Amino acid sequence: MKLLRPLKLKQPSARRGAPHVNATLVRFNTADGISLDGAMVGTGTVGVVLAHEYDNDLCGACRFANYPAKRGLRVFAVDVRC
């Protein structure tokens, strides 16, 4: 996975209200060239990946990011190809 130069993405909290801390926003390309967005919250050395349910977007997973981030985990919420 190749990370692209950061583009102007909206903070998840500006989209739907969570997480309530600023996220590190990333845009990356899949192996077949599809551009996806992601948001990282927390500063831990151990991480968890959150994927949203069908017919939702990154914000559907972001609302669960605060809990593990406040407990020392780094959380990566990612848009999938729905």
Image (tube, rainbow, N blue to C red):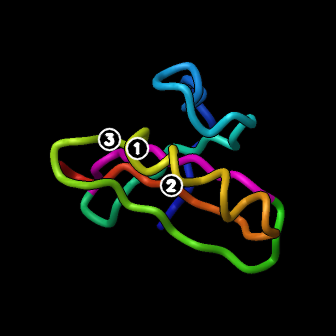
Secondary structure type for disc 1: helix
Q: CA distance from mark 2 to mark 1?
A: 6 Å
Q: Which residue is mark 3?
A: 57
Within 10 Å of disc 1 (Cα), the crowding (few <14, some 14-19, many 20+) is many
Circle nearer the N terminus (2, 1): 1
- Please report the residue visible at 66 percent of the width from the left and 58 percent of the height from the top: 67
Q: Which mark is residue 58?
A: 1
In this view, 12 is above or below 43: above
In this view, 7 is above or below 28: above
Within 10 Å of disc 2 (Cα), the crowding (few <14, some 14-19, many 20+) is many
Q: CA distance from mark 1 to mark 3?
A: 4 Å
Q: Could you tell me the amino acid type at mark 1?
A: Leu
- Nearer the observer, 10 or 64: 64
- What residue span does the magenta drawing correspond to? 33-42
Residue 71 position in % (x across, y down): 79, 67
From the viewer's perspective, is 62 left or right of 80? right
In this view, 26 is above or below 22: below
Asked whether 37 falls inside the magenta stretch, the response is yes
- Nearer the observer, 77 or 32: 77
- Please report the residue visible at 45 percent of the width from the left and 44 percent of the height from the top: 37
Within 10 Å of disc 3 (Cα), the crowding (few <14, some 14-19, many 20+) is some
Q: CA distance from mark 2 to mark 3?
A: 10 Å
Tell me if label 2 and label 1 are in contact, CB under 8 Å. yes
Secondary structure type for disc 3: loop
Asked whether 70 falls inside the magenta stretch, the response is no
Q: Which residue is mark 2?
A: 77
Circle nearer the N terminus (2, 3): 3
- Please report the residue visible at 25 percent of the width from the left and 55 percent of the height from the top: 53
Residue 13 position in % (x across, y down): 59, 27
Tell me if label 1 and label 3 are in contact, CB under 8 Å. yes
